[in-house]
Image (spheres, helix red, strand yellow):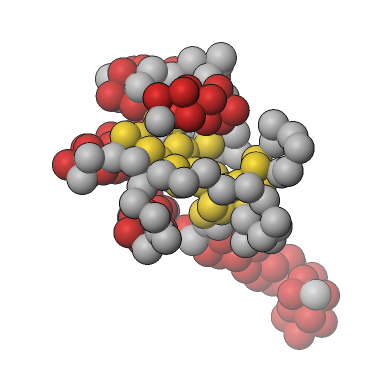
């Protein structure tokens, strides 16, 4: 619609250029404020989805799981960090483990890796463990290159949320 109106008002070349710039601005706005989805298990399955969309999902006392539905980039990490900490501090029961599902984060930059490390440090000072699961190959490579992988409890292609949940429940 933006392109259509811009072409009508400004002409073809200026209208298309205006629409391209508008598209870039719109995408940057979306990436700067990504959806941080608190997760729960779909009843009777091993899959985890957004509890705000599916309130019937199973929750696990003492755990907070979340998924960032965007890459972790320098211009969105503060929003992500703040949102996660708000969720953790407003949880109904005390949180002992926070799990970050990276399956919907196809890329992470150095700021994103540092944010995960800072989040781990801050949660550790509160006595809360922090783990990551389902990281893509490129994300794992960046976390390893930044030296963050071991601080996050290890990052490899075999770690999934169901595995972390089973391990947590076995220790509880």
Tell me which residue sits at (73%, 66%) in the image.
16
Tell me which residue sits at (62%, 61%) in the image.
52
Q: Residue furthest left?
A: 125
Where does the image place residue 91, in percent across and percent down from the top left?
40, 59
* Count of marks, rendered view: 0
Tell me which residue sits at (41%, 44%) in the image.
62
The answer to whether residue 106 is seen in the rendering is no
Q: Which quadrant holds the C terminus?
A: top left
Q: Does residue 32 lie above or below 60 as drawn? A: below
Tell me which residue sits at (32%, 59%) in the image.
89
Q: Does residue 110 lie above or below 171 as drawn? A: below
43 sits left or right of 116 in the view:
right
Where does the image place residue 114, in percent across and percent down from the top left?
29, 36
160 sits left or right of 5 in the view:
left
105 sits left or right of 64 in the view:
right
The answer to whether residue 5 is seen in the rendering is yes
Q: Does residue 141 lie above or below 112 as drawn? A: above
Image quadrant where residue 119 sits = top left
């Amino acid at each position: 619609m933006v392109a259509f109106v811009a072409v009508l008002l400004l002409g073809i070349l200026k209208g298309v250029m205006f629409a391209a710039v508008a598209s870039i601005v719109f995408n940057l706005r979306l990436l700067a404020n990504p959806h941080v989805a608190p997760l729960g298990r779909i009843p009777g399955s091993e899959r985890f989805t957004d509890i705000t969309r599916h309130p019937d999902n199973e929750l696990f006392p003492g755990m907070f799981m979340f998924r960032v539905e965007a890459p972790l980039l320098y211009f969105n990490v503060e929003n992500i960090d703040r949102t996660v900490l708000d969720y953790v501090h407003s949880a109904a029961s005390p949180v002992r483990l926070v799990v970050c599902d990276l399956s919907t984060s196809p890329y992470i930059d150095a700021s994103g890796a540092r944010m995960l490390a800072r989040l781990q440090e801050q949660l550790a000072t509160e006595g809360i463990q922090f783990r990551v699961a389902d990281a893509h190959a490129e994300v794992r490579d960046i976390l390893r290159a930044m030296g963050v992988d071991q601080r996050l409890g290890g990052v490899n292609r075999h770690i999934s949320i169901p595995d972390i949940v089973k391990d947590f429940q076995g220790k509880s």
